[in-house]
């Protein structure tokens, strides 16, 4: 039988896998779209063409404390190229570098190290302005702003809230919780407290399937509300290709600029499948650091597979399940209803972890999940409710045994950033 050689990203490496040609429905990746040759020039172009907002120069003029919210090392946004252009524009408006603070919008991720900060922001930015990790655990670093009209508690980074000008930098890709990353997501969960993030994550699992690729949904509306309530001024978002190259940048109003970026992001990341597959082989790239990030692989695969199919997640997870939320592994073998019942009975302080446990459970209740990971032990794999394998070949062999010799397989090379559409 003819074999097709597939190259699957695995951290900084590639795995080569042979798949029978007759079984392969297709290999799907975000589209290869022309990227800009000069990121700084594209940043200048975006700033010169605001969407639904005044220019950065006019908005920042006369301000005292400026905060730039920027995504972390788990994202590919080229902040080291964008921020110097932004600082220069602020300088021209009379804002000195010492008036500016960058807050790394970690959400509930671990702190970035000094080496990672240098890599992400570059020497020029490190030398020019103060850069701080968001501290989502310390109550002294947060301010309580009550609740949204929908009842979500609002706990926000105090330094960011107190600033009289705020701009967020991130990238727009499909995301299972608010539909797409970008826009107001830099505030929630970016600079929010654990209770706020837990509430919006729980909101995201009220439906049986994720909001991946759904532009207007309850979570996105809640994120917009929170960002407006803290006085978020404008955003600067990029749409990237799978390698992290900038295709286009968007600057302007929190919602209007974001929605323009979503249009392009959908063109890049949506892939059309003729039908659902029996097996989905999915790489977690570029969300490879820990399973807390790699789990995004599940939702794209879930959109591409038949009920009771088999998802094979391939991810290095060099930092294991989660550096910050390691306790989640104690509940990931439970059903979604069991976790919901535990929440009702106040068994959790960390509702964010509980919400993700529900999200993972809902996928596992529709499909079987295999995992191939050098960073997840066999014991951890079973605790996650998955079937662990040492190699992709072993996982594929078992999948074909279970689904039959004629089973169709789809390969997703960059699953966390892919939006499968059955047409």
Image (tube, rainbow, N blue to C red):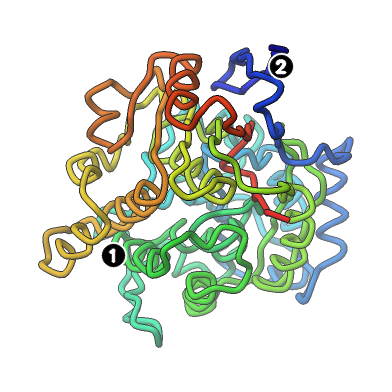
The residue carrying mark 2 is: 4
Tell me if 219 is positioned left or right of 411 in this view: left
Determine whether 59 is above or below 347 in the image. Answer: below
Q: Quadrant of residue 278?
A: top right
x, y percentage for residue 321?
A: 32, 33
Whether residue 125 is visible here, answered yes or no, is: yes
The residue carrying mark 1 is: 195
Tell me if 147 is positioned left or right of 217 in this view: left
Direction bottom: furthest residue = 149
Residue at 60% x, 65% y: name it: 214
Residue at 88% x, 39% y: name it: 34
Q: Which mark is residue 315?
A: none
x, y percentage for residue 27?
A: 70, 31
Q: Please name whichever residue, 119 or 320, is drawn nearer the observer in this view of the structure.
A: 320
x, y percentage for residue 202?
A: 34, 65
Badge 1 or badge 2: first in the primary sequence: 2
Q: Please name whichever residue, 373 or 306, is drawn nearer the observer in this view of the structure.
A: 306
């Amino acid at each position: 039988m003819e074999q097709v050689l597939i190259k699957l990203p695995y951290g900084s490496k590639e795995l080569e896998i042979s798949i029978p040609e007759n079984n392969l429905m297709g290999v799907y990746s975000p589209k290869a779209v022309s990227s800009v040759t000069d990121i700084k020039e594209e940043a200048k172009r975006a700033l010169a063409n605001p969407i639904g907002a005044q220019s950065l120069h006019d908005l920042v003029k006369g301000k005292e404390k400026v905060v730039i919210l920027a995504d972390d090392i788990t994202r590919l946004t080229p902040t080291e190229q964008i921020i110097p252009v932004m600082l220069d524009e602020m300088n021209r408006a009379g804002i000195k570098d010492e008036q500016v603070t960058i807050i790394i919008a970690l959400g509930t991720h671990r702190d970035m190290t000094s080496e990672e900060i240098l890599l992400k922001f570059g020497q020029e930015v490190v030398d020019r302005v103060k850069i701080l990790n968001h501290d989502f655990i310390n109550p002294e670093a947060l301010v309580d702003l009550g609740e949204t009209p929908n009842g979500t508690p609002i706990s926000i980074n105090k330094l960011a809230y107190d600033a009289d000008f705020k701009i967020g930098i991130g990238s727009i890709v499909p995301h299972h919780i608010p539909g797409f990353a970008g826009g107001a997501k830099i505030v929630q969960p970016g600079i929010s407290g654990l209770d706020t993030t837990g509430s919006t994550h729980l909101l995201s699992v009220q439906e049986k399937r994720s909001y991946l690729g759904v532009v207007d949904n309850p979570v996105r509306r809640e994120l917009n509300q929170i960002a407006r309530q803290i006085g978020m001024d404008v955003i600067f978002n990029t749409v990237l290709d799978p390698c992290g190259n900038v295709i286009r940048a968007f600057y302007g109003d929190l919602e209007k600029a974001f929605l323009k970026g979503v249009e392009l992001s959908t063109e890049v990341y949506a892939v059309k499948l003729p039908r659902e597959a029996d097996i989905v082989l999915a790489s977690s790239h570029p969300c490879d650091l820990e399973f807390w990030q790699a789990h995004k692989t599940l939702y794209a695969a879930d959109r591409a597979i038949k009920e009771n199919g088999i998802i094979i997640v391939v991810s290095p997870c060099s930092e294991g399940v989660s550096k910050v939320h390691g306790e989640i592994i104690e509940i990931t073998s439970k059903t979604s209803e069991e976790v919901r019942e535990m929440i009702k009975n106040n068994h959790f302080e960390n509702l964010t972890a509980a919400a993700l446990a529900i999200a993972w459970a809902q996928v596992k209740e529709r499909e079987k999940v295999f995992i191939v990971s050098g960073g997840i032990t066999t014991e951890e794999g079973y605790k996650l409710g998955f079937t662990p394998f040492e190699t992709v070949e072993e996982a594929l062999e078992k999948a074909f045994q279970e689904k039959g010799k004629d089973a169709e397989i789809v390969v997703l090379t960059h699953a966390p950033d892919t939006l499968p559409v059955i047409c």
